Image (tube, rainbow, N blue to C red):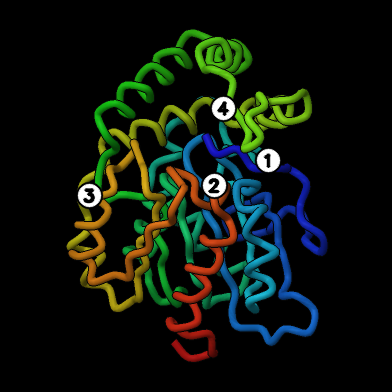
């Protein structure tokens, strides 16, 4: 999972419930920096087991480039409501329609960025209706199902969720994962960090994790469909990725005729691994994709 450096919204940003035609969704909404000419609005869609806080490191740099950024928790994800056990509520088509409703509420047109699972949901939304979007950035999000090793991890999680509570699964995950290290070499995962991550985990609805986990393991290749959509596309990833191997992302970008960015010293979450380089690359792309009122 992505590990944001903080769950506190950056200065100037607002955390609130965005009202849409399909219900309310928790967002962090960061305005353009003072004195900077507005260039556009961005919707940021997190990945599997992630949340809107995964984009906290990007809000400031993108605000200084002229972009209002709205990061959202999807249905049943962290602070957005959803059914506990009805997996049909989390079908990809339902989540894509949620995203279109979010864009309408934020105010189209927007640049759309999806991380990992969020990229595949974003792709589905664009294929339903591309008109509200200026561009699509797929961040560490591949053409079809995830790698075999990641499919095995997701299957273990889904099996556990079928017989254990969310709290029990969290404790099992913590027992299996080694402590992470910070850049200083000290063990990461202090009380506040772990408690925020645990709180996020417990906020997820089990049916959402089971349904979207299945999607990650069975997603078909829809690159040809996306290539036919008249929308600028950007494929961005870290230099290493065990969810979709980097050569697979290279090939997808070539098939899409998309811009391709590889962020050095980053893995599956360049938004938290190297936020400044990531923000610079996506803002450069958005600048070229256009920020005026015309589509």
Q: CA distance from mark 2 to mark 3?
A: 21 Å
Judging by the rendered image, the residue that carries numbered circle 1 is 79
Q: CA distance from mark 4 to mark 2?
A: 32 Å
Q: Is residue 179 above or below residue 265?
A: above
Q: CA distance from mark 1 to mark 3?
A: 33 Å
Q: Secondary structure at mark 3?
A: helix
**Crowd around label 2: few <14 · some 14–19 · many ≥20 (10 Å):** many
Q: Mark 4 or 2 closer to N-term?
A: 4
| Residue 96 seen in the figure | no
Q: CA distance from mark 1 to mark 2?
A: 24 Å
User: The C terminus appears in which quarter of the rendering?
Assistant: bottom left
Q: Mark 4 or 1 closer to N-term?
A: 1
Judging by the rendered image, the residue that carries numbered circle 4 is 84
Q: Mark 1 or 3 closer to N-term?
A: 1
Q: Nearer the viewer, residue 157 or 211?
A: 157
Instruction: Pinpoint residue 197: horizontal percent, then vertical percent.
Output: 66, 30
**Crowd around label 4: few <14 · some 14–19 · many ≥20 (10 Å):** few
**Crowd around label 3: few <14 · some 14–19 · many ≥20 (10 Å):** few
> Disc number at residue 273?
2
Label 4 close to label 1 by CB (< 8 Å): no
């Amino acid at each position: 999972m992505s590990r944001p450096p903080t769950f506190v919204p950056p200065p100037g940003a607002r955390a609130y419930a965005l009202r849409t035609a399909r219900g309310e969704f928790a967002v962090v909404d960061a305005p353009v920096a003072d004195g900077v000419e507005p260039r556009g609005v961005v919707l940021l869609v997190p990945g599997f087991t992630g949340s809107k806080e995964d984009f906290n490191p990007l809000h400031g740099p993108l605000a200084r480039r002229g972009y209002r950024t709205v990061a959202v928790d999807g249905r049943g994800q962290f602070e957005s409501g959803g059914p506990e056990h009805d997996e049909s509520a989390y079908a990809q088509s339902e989540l894509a329609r949620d995203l279109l409703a979010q864009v309408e509420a934020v105010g189209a047109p927007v640049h759309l960025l999806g991380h990992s699972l969020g990229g595949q949901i974003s792709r589905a939304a664009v294929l339903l209706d591309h008109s509200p979007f200026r561009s699509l950035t797929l961040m560490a999000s591949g053409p079809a199902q995830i790698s075999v090793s990641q499919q095995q991890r997701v299957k273990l999680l889904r099996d556990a969720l079928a017989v254990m509570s969310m709290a029990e699964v969290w404790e099992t995950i913590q027992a299996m994962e080694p402590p992470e290290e910070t850049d200083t070499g000290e063990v990461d995962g202090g009380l506040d960090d772990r408690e925020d991550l645990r709180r996020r985990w417990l906020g997820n609805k089990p049916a959402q994790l089971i349904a979207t986990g299945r999607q990650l393991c069975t997603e078909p290749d829809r690159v040809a469909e996306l290539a036919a959509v008249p929308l600028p596309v950007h494929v961005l990833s870290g230099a290493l990725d065990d969810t979709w191997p980097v050569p697979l992302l290279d090939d997808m970008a070539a098939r899409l005729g998309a811009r391709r960015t590889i962020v050095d010293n980053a893995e599956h979450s360049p938004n938290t691994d190297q936020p400044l380089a990531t923000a610079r690359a996506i803002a450069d792309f958005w600048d070229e994709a256009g920020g005026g009122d015309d589509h």
